[in-house]
Image: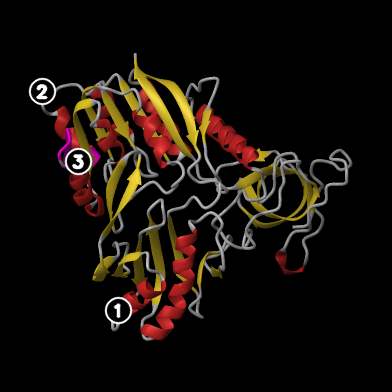
Amino acid sequence: MKPRANRSSTSRPAAAKATAAEAGGQSAPQLVRIEKPVYGGSFLARVEGKAVFVPMALPGEEARIRLHEEKRGYAIGEAEEIVVASAERVSPACPHFGACGGCHYQHAGYEAQLEMKRAVLRETMERAGVVVPGEISVLANAPWRYRNRIRLAFDAAGRAGYRGRRSHAVIPVRECPIAAPLLIEAALAFPEVLRRAAPALRPTEVTLFCDAAENALLASVISASAGKTHFDELAQAWHDCVPALRGVEWMVEGSRGQPSRTVARWGEGSLFYSAAGFGYRVDQGAFFQVNRWLVDALVERVTAGRQGELAWDLFAGVGLFARQLTRNFRRVVAVESAPAATRALAANLKGSSGVPVRSATLEFLRAQSRTSGLQTPNLIVVDPPRTGLGAETCALIAKAAAPVVVYVSCDPATLSRDLRALAGSGYAVESITVVDLFPQTFHLETLVELRHA
């Protein structure tokens, strides 16, 4: 794209009529006005009334676009030229932006990114029939070098990179300004270490996770085959190059939708992550919040001022919220089913008022609903995966009738669906906060407090 901001936004119509298709089946360029952001990283324009999703544009801009994919109800376009640029447009900090599929908003100032996320969240909720409070607050911190976990793939030449924006091709990278520097140091060192120590190994991906201070690092190397000749030599050589590396696991890709399995380990299987005044044990492969600058503030927002006899932390992970809740609740039940997290959860709750329960959340709630005379929790915290809670889980949470439910969500659509269900069962939205765990991307983390009528 070539931004050009020296023309009036009223000097052209909002959308020019398409001319004859060019050779190769591509449409001719068309001049459009960008209306608003949409969830997923694109921006809405219209061509003859039809919705067109355009990445790397900004609201209010006038852009010359070319359609490259048409569906029955919408089309996808690419901006070939920004004719009138938004005042919020900035130069991306990363040289890989645009080709790399990891970031979507680097071309916008950070305050503009936050406003776009707030607007997307409000529209998504209102479309779902959720009553939204007048103010959606924002919890944010430094928008760079925040990630404590990254996943990279390898191209045919063995170079590490991210998947491309419009394809699954690997885009080799030499830097990543949203990641902790230690992660990129380790990622860039790996291909050379691999060539020297274990040239016969053919990994396809690597996942790297570090603590907030970048003192400790865990790596998972993923391969299509179980062959692991010279794996120990590889891990030791990598550690020699990157001393913060504490542990490496070799994993084989699962077939037919099955998860990957670990076939070899070197070093330690966990690290300790200091957050909100506690050192959490986090095992290889376990979920932990990705933004090292915002973990403390998120925990504070979820747990501060909460107290009582009983709290439930559903989808508890390694106990990030549960461990903090034990300070002010006589009993905290932390429910988690993922094997990668349950052992660490038990360790993190040891000696506290927390009780780890190894169970899927739905099965736990079903069991609770079948038992009469159980104590009603004073608080329920839920932090589900992207699929959200679902109808039955919402109904069972409503049946538990806790006075307060705190919902931490990573998907506005499933969040809105679940809030509508909870609202129909006697809960009202008290407050909504955009927690910007993923600056420079479209991803939206939301914290909602609900109170029972």
Q: How many marks?
A: 3
Q: In this view, does 73 lie to the left or right of 80?
A: left
Q: Which residue does the numbered mark 1 point to in the structure image?
A: 231
**Marks 2 and 3: in contact by CB < 8 Å?**
no
Q: Where does residue 250 sit, x and y in percent of width and height?
A: 30, 71
- Tell me if residue 357 is in the magenta stretch: yes
* Amino acid type, mark 2: Ser
* Amino acid type, mark 1: Phe
Crowding at dot 2, Cα within 10 Å, few <14 / some 14-19 / many 20+, comes out as few
Residue 224 can be seen in this image:
yes
Q: Which residue does the numbered mark 2 point to in the structure image?
A: 372
Residue 227 can be seen in this image:
no
**Mark nearer the N terminus (3 vs 2):** 3
Point 47% across, 52% down: residue: 147
Distance from disc 3 to disc 2, alpha carbons, whole Å, reads 27 Å
Q: What element carries label 1?
A: helix
Q: Which residue lies furthest to the top in this view?
A: 453
Q: In this view, does 58 lie to the left or right of 159?
A: right
Q: Where does residue 314 sit, x and y in percent of width and height?
A: 27, 36
Q: Quadrant of residue 422?
A: top left
| Region rendered in magenta | 351-361
Q: What element carries label 3?
A: helix
Q: Which residue does the numbered mark 3 point to in the structure image?
A: 349
Q: Where does residue 165 sit, x and y in percent of width and height?
A: 58, 60
